[in-house]
Image: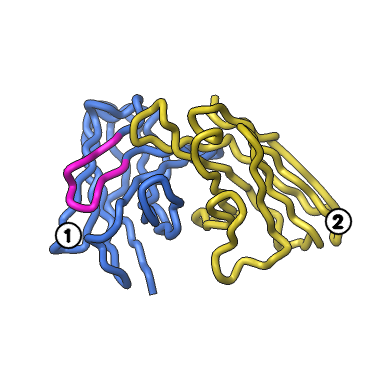
Amino acid sequence: QSVLTQPPSASGTPGQRVTISCSGSSSNIGSNTVNWYQQLPGTAPKLLIYSNNQRPSGVPDRFSGSKSGTSASLAISGLQSEDEADYYCAAWDDSLNGSVVFGGGTKLTVL
Amino acid sequence: EVQLVESGGGLVQPGGSLRLSCAASGFTFSSYWMSWVRQAPGKGLEWVANIKQDGSEKYYVDSVKGRFTISRDNAKNSLYLQMNSLRAEDTAVYYCARVWEWLGEFDYWGQGTLVTVSS
């Protein structure tokens, strides 16, 4: 059971906007920034969003992140087939010294 | 170009040991925290351990404390994970990852190395 809670699955049709939620607590999301990782099938995870809402160079602006209190969300607009992947949220946790906690992951299916 | 290349995975019996390595290039290795993250087959990501730039601070997930040891050799631009008393539940792909800054993101990941613990 993961410390951060994500829905196990999400889906949308091409062009649609989908959001993935991530719920935590005061010791992790409530105290630290949230990062999101994308894992395409059979590949290593890749940083998608950092510091709640920042995109690394090369990440399309279709991807956006937000945080409020102890929850965060990832939004993908203009959904494309290549967005089909697993998405993970993560944050450092102050109650577990020097530790990072992940969400269980959300499998996004593009219908 | 930042590159992280893991090696050392394989099949090991329960109770056995294995040492993973991660060769870093394309950046000043000694300037960054580094981490190990694992993923059991068909499961999600789990952070395993962190190590400070000079190796003076190390942190572990509870399930591996006392069994795993993270270390680094800045002269060789290498990160290590010594895994002892391995259990079936340690079976996973192990990724090394660079930490951008304390409390920051894992900004680069290796391709992973598979560890299988089975008799």
Q: Residues within 10 Å of mark 1 (few under 14, many from 20)?
A: some
Give whichever of B1, B32 is nearer the camera.
B32
Q: Which chain is drawn using yellow?
A: A
Residue A73: % across, % down:
68, 43
Residue B46: % across, % down:
45, 37
Tell me which segment is drawn in magenta.
Answer: B50-59
Determine the residue positioned at 26% across, 45% down.
Answer: B51
* Residue B86 sits above or below residue A35 on the image: above
Q: Which chain is drawn using blue?
A: B
Give whichever of B63, A17 is nearer the camera.
A17
Give whichever of B52, B44 is nearer the camera.
B52
- Along the horizontal axis of the image, is A93 left or right of A73? left
- Along the horizontal axis of the image, is B52 left or right of A98? left
- Calculate the distance from the C-alpha at mark 1 to the C-alpha at mark 2: 47 Å
Tell me the residue that label 1 is attached to. Answer: B74
* Residue B98 falls inside the magenta stretch: no
Q: Label 1 lies in what chain?
A: B
Residue A61: % across, % down:
69, 66
Q: Amino acid at mark 2?
A: Gln
Tell me the residue that label 2 is attached to. Answer: A16
Determine the residue positioned at 63% across, 34% down.
Answer: A69
Mark sitting on residue B108: none
Q: Amino acid at mark 1?
A: Asn
